[in-house]
Amino acid sequence: MTKIYHQTFGKGKPIVLVHGWAMHSGIWLDFARQLAQQYQVTCIDLPGHGYSENIDAFTLEKIGQLLVDSLPDEPSCWLGWSLGATVVLDIAKRFPDRVHSLILLAGNPLFVQTDEWNGMKLTVLEEFANQLTVNCQATLLRFLSLQVKNLPDYKMVLKTLKMALTQCKSPDKETLLGGLEILKSEDLRSVLSDNKVPACLILGGQDTLIPINVRKNLLQLNSEINLNIIDKAGHVPFFSHERDVLTIISDFMGNQ
């Protein structure tokens, strides 16, 4: 079986943290320790990321199965950031008995823009895919810059992100391209519209990857969604606005 790395902190209601594209579970470390003052927090590496082993095809079907098989057989709150949000939505769809609730952090159930849905332009994702084959490291650094582009203290946040990224070897190109393909092709809006699992969404008002106008689409999809906007945050609110994110999570978990 493919080795999936994870580490757990604290005691209480279980929360599983799933990181974003090209990252690893170490990105959560400081945030996880704060969250672990109230909850049992597990940080897990996606296949081919951090200390987890590669898989031959980086698809949602394989990712979700590996993650749930690697953790205790109990319902948990699954918190996904960016690509991780797509992963946890898929887990909620295919393994409902393992999902007590969902927290989507800077995530979008349909990542790409369509005529009726606000998202990232498909051409931007395709450009990332093309650039990966030319200069992988430069593409990753550009992606980091986009995440913090509009923040007043972006240089400091970007430096922290770069340091976190270099703590582990970057995923290989096939894994990175697989992650982009998931973002390009997956549509998991039905998970939220079905309203079968409590869901909390946390968006940044300055996020350059998840357009803030998607909140209208989300509320039309399900008016009962717990939707939170941190006005001055970008794509990494757990870095730039840690206290705000922790408060939102605590309020949401307190009602579950």
Image: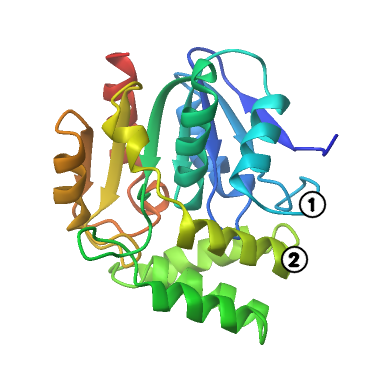
Corner quadrant of residue 45: top right
Task: Check disc 2 and give the amino acid type.
Answer: Asp
Helix, strand or loop at label 1? It is loop
Residue linked to disc 1: 54
Residue found at x 40% / y 29%: 102
- Identify the residue at image location x=38%, y=44%: 105
Would you say residue 170 is visible in this rendering?
A: no
**Circles 1 and 2: CB distance less than 8 Å?**
yes
What residue sits right under mark 2 in the picture?
172
SS at circle 2: loop
Classify the position of the C terminus by image quarter. top left
Taking the image as shown, residue 183 lies to the left or right of residue 217, namely right
Q: Is residue 46 left or right of residue 143?
A: right
Using the image, tell me which numbered label, if any, was put on residue 247: none
Residue drawn at x 46%, y 45% is: 86
x and y percent of residue 138 in the render?
60, 82
Q: Residues within 10 Å of mark 2 (few under 14, many from 20)?
A: some
Q: Amino acid at mark 1?
A: Asn
User: Quarter holding the N terminus?
Assistant: top right
